[in-house]
Image (spheres, rainbow, N blue to C red):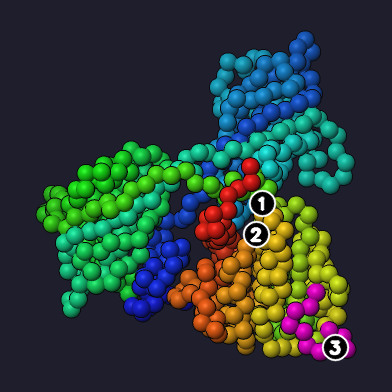
Amino acid sequence: MGNCCSDDGGGRSAVGGTSASQHDHNDAVDLFLKSRGYRGLFVQIELSLSASNLRDRDVLSKSDPMAVVYTKSKDGALEELGRTEVVLNSLNPMWFTKLIINYQFEVVQTLVFRVYDVDTQFHNVDVKMLKLDEQQFLGEATCSLSEIVSKSNRSLTLDLVHREESIKSTRSQNLGELTVHAEELSSSKIAMEIIFRCSDLEYKDLFSRSDPFLVISKIVEGGISIPICKTEVIKNDLKPKWKSVFLNIQQVGSKDNLLTIECFNFNSNGKHDLIGKIQKSLADLEKLHSSGQGENFFLPTAVGNNHHNKVLKSQLFVEYFSETVEHTFLDYLAGGCELNFMVAIDFTASNGNPRLPDSLHYIDPSGRPNAYQRAILEVGEVLQFYDSDKRFPAWGFGARPIDGPVSHCFNLNGSSNYCEVDGIQGIMMAYTSALFNVSLAGPTLFGPVISSAAQIASQSLINGRQKYYVLLIITDGVITDLQETKDALVKASDLPLSIFILGVGGADFKEMEVLDADKGERLESSNGRVASRDIVQFVPFRDVHSGEISVVQALLAELPTHFLTYMRTRNILPNS
């Protein structure tokens, strides 16, 4: 993806200079923020539980049920999220205790629910102190958080089964039903739009004025600052006025929580100079806006063993402050909006002979997935929950079908009439089958598959349905139809469509970064038209080391922002 700190121009563009859009990704400052603990933000979900037709395990009365909720990691390990209260003498309990979980769109968050009958002798014991092996097990259910929030009523009813049966596909004994309801906390919907400006900033560069930007952090336990927001860099200016920044209550906790606002001078090597800082709450910033007064920056200084703050002449002003309630990604899902997954796979000869182990298309007899299969599985397992019919358009490009010319967009299922397959396994089967029915060729062209995806996305506008499309292109090399691809992307930028490009293998993908407008100027077509928004994310699909988030997770984390940008800029409201 390149290091945007390496040159001044690229670095400024990467941190949101004047050439970049309001929603651009800011690599240079992002690296700086991540080194200080920034790891992204998530929506908080409140879970409510109820059950019906539970087994009666008590002799003289009904069961006294309690529910325990766990999150399940990929390796199968369970981590307890929380417990409800005990409801006495009920086979149809409605628990009042709510459980809070952070919803992460880009991750499949598996939840396990276990219901226990709490013995009478433990009724006066705090539920957190109960030993579960001393209680009677009533049943277990499993689902993903995505399955719940993607329902129009955000409720999902699950069959309770024996613990050992919950992971089996065979018919299980029904031990009752558990209903889970998810509600997005209102704090994630209250947004603040703030415009900052400064006066009398100090010179930090030797031969020019400073290049300032702001970093806003919240203060957590122990006085640690966690960055949550940043502005763009303004070049060569001691009286800067930045574009709007957006904060929500969920990010900061409350309007009265202290925030640290730091002003830095941008340096292309990533070592940014602190100009000054202030500490104010959102409520304080609102008062500053009302009064029209500025707040002096200070610099922490140390003289011997004494630490004090040096008050500076430089001041921060709040030029604009507005509080609004915004529709969120989950509001659109609740209104019936769907995400539709599409995939296009590179079958060019540079992938290598699929029958040889060194090929990127090699199907390992041991069952270990190749890079293409891994990408399909990792993206598909997240997006499939948001598509009701789970029928996915799937194409190949850069190959020669049997007795035919090279095709740069052919249906992966071999049909000449329709491109859809059933489910993620349908994509996997069609991909494997295609490897034995086409000859790898070339060159690498993206234009035709992008146009096919755009045509499908445009149909949803005609039909008036709320759908948003995600095209995953998996490729091993650099495209040869760059301008044609740009033309197709510019045209598609007006549609409800995002395009994720994953580069597999060891090729140098630097030339591909021009398609991702996060790295610089918006795309421009051959006739001079500029893309209305950035719809492309490109990343190389590298192996993930222990403790790191996967490339696919990082990629998909951008999708809700793409989605909301499209909906909000076109004033499309969620269906009621």
Q: Quadrant of the C terminus?
A: top right
Residue at the (15%, 49%) spot, across then down:
308
Q: Determine crowd level at label 1: few under 14, some 14-19, many 20+ residues with C-alpha closer than 10 A.
A: many
Residue 399 sits above or below residue 186 on the image: below
> Residue 414: within the magenta?
no
Q: From where the camera sits, is residue 325 visible? A: yes
Q: Amino acid at mark 3?
A: Gly
Question: In front: mark 3 or mark 2?
Answer: 2
Where residue 265 appears, x then y in whole percent?
Answer: 26, 67
Q: Main secondary structure of the magenta part?
A: loop
Helix, strand or loop at mark 1? loop
Classed neighbour count for the residue bearing mark 2: other residues with Cα under 10 Å, few (<14), some (14–19), many (≥20): many
Residue position marked by numbered label 3 in the rendering: 404
Helix, strand or loop status at disc 2: strand
Q: Are marks 1 and 2 in contact (CB under 8 Å)?
A: yes
x then y, percent, for residue 513? 52, 78
The answer to whether marks 3 and 2 mark residues whose Cβ atoms lie closer than 8 Å is no
Establish if 482 lies above or below 496: below
Q: In this rendering, which labeled residue sits more in front, label 1 or label 3?
A: 1
The quadrant holding residue 116 is top right
Give the SS element for disc 3.
loop
- What type is the residue that disc 2 sits on? Tyr
Q: CA distance from mark 1 to mark 2?
A: 8 Å
Q: Is residue 404 magenta?
A: yes
Q: State whether residue 289 is above or below residue 115.
A: below
Which range of residues does the magenta coloring cover? 401-411
Residue linked to disc 2 = 468
